[in-house]
Amino acid sequence: MPAPGTVPGITVEYVRGLVSFAHSLGALTITYEGLLGDANSDGVVDYVDAIYVLEYDAKLRTADELAYGLCDVNGDGAVDYVDAIFILEYDAKLITKFPAAV
């Protein structure tokens, strides 16, 4: 049984704020790289990313509509309002890195 917050077959690596997200499906490996917290993949982490995460958490947006692998900024295995709060704190310069990037 995997540990809480982990998914078998998925690896996530954080390096200096960037995340490499890979999912292995037998012979197929899907890799996504980008800026941790950048939910809309525009190259900037800001309040718009927090809105995307909140919309996802409220079931108004699907995982396909955001860079899901980049949104779990606290590393708890879920994308929810807590991640949105961290993204807003980052945008307001209250924090300089996300807990998942430690």
Image: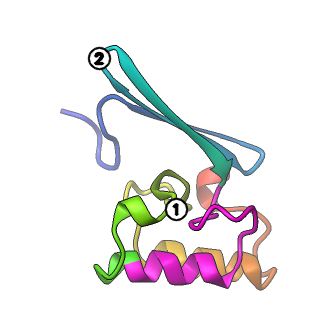
**What amino acid type is highlighted by mark number 2?**
Gly
- Circle 2 SS class: loop
Residue where numbered disc 2 is placed: 26
The residue positioned 56% from the left and 66% from the top of the image is: 39
Q: Quadrant of residue 92?
A: bottom right
Spot occupied by residue 54 in the image (x, y as percentages of width and height): 44, 82
| Residue of label 1 | 71
Task: Determine whether the residue tagged by mark 1 lies in a helix, strand or loop.
Answer: loop
Q: Amino acid at mark 1?
A: Cys
- Residue 25 in percent (x, y) is at 30, 24
Q: Which residues fall within the magenta stretch? A: 36-55
Which of label 2 and label 1 is nearer to you? 2
Where is residue 42 drawn, in percent x and y? 70, 65
On the image, the x and y values in percent for residue 85 come to 56, 81
Residue at the far top in the pictured view: 27
Task: Kindly identify the residue that appears in the image at 29 percent across and 40 percent down.
Answer: 3
